[in-house]
Structure formats: structure tokens, C-alpha cells
Amino acid sequence: MKTFIGAMAALLVIIIGIQIYIDVLDDTVSTMEESIEEIISAAGENDWENCQKALEHFQLHWKDAKKWFAVFIHHDEMDLIHEALYEIEIYIQYQDRVQTCAKANVLKILLEHIPENERLTLENVL
């Protein structure tokens, strides 16, 4: 009986830990998505100074978040996010509104995909 109670307690701790991780992940991704929206908005208005500031804001959050993301998410997804960031940086530098908005939307989709993959769902478990 003690073994069963111990196993259930361990399972409960794991489930609570996963839920806390998902909540933190959601908050982090939401903050970064706000920066992406600012990039898209500023690029759409050809406001390249604010676009650059929004990108720098995103990069600060990404620098902190990628340490934790690297532990839990696929490295292929990390590579795609880094690639999109580098491309956005160049598009902003050359003031290419269409490419900046397009790649920023790709980055947004990549970020939205992270919490979906980490949630405890039957699809993700199997």
C-alpha cells in the first residue's frame, strides 16, 4: 500500500510540474508573440526604427527563453526559429516590408507550435 501511495504522489508531482511548465511556456510565448505583432505592425507602417526596437525586445526574451526551450523542444524547431530571426533581422536592415511581415508571421506560427507540442494530450503521448 505504501508503494502505491508513493507512486501516486510521484505521478501527481510530475503532472503538476508539467502543468506549471506549460503555463510558464504559454506566458513566455505570449510575450514573444506581442513583440512579433509589434514587428509586423511597425513594418506595415514602414516604421523601421520601432520595428528594430521590437526585434531587439523579442531577442532579449528569446535569449532567456531558449535556455529552457532547448531542454524540452526539438532542436529542429530551435533551428527554424533562429533561421527566421536572422532573416527578419536582414529584412529589417534592408527595409523590406513584405518579407519582414511574411517571415515574422512564420516565426509566430513556429512559436505557437511549441506549447501545443508540449501539452499533455493523448496525441502527444502516443
Image (cartoon, rainbow, N blue to C red):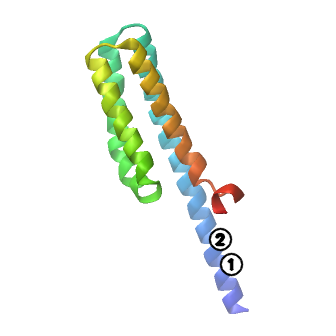
Q: Residue at x 64, y 74 (%)?
A: 11
Q: Is residue 90 left or right of residue 107?
A: left
Crowding at dot 2, Cα within 10 Å, few <14 / some 14-19 / many 20+, comes out as: few
Displayed quadrant of residue 103: top left
Front residue (pair 81, 19)? 81
What residue do we see at 46% from left, 54% from top? 74
SS under mark 1: helix
Dividing the image into 4 quarters, which one contains the C terminus?
bottom right
Mark carried by residue 8: 1
The reply to whether residue 52 is in sight is no
Q: What is the C-alpha distance between the residues marked 1 and 2?
A: 6 Å
Left or right: where 36 falls relative to 3: left
Q: Position of residue 62 (x, y in %)?
A: 37, 41
Q: Looking at the picture, does residue 57 appear above or below residue 9?
A: above
For mark 2, what is the residue?
A: 12
Residue depicted at x 37% and y 45%: 79
42 or 108: nearer the viewer: 108
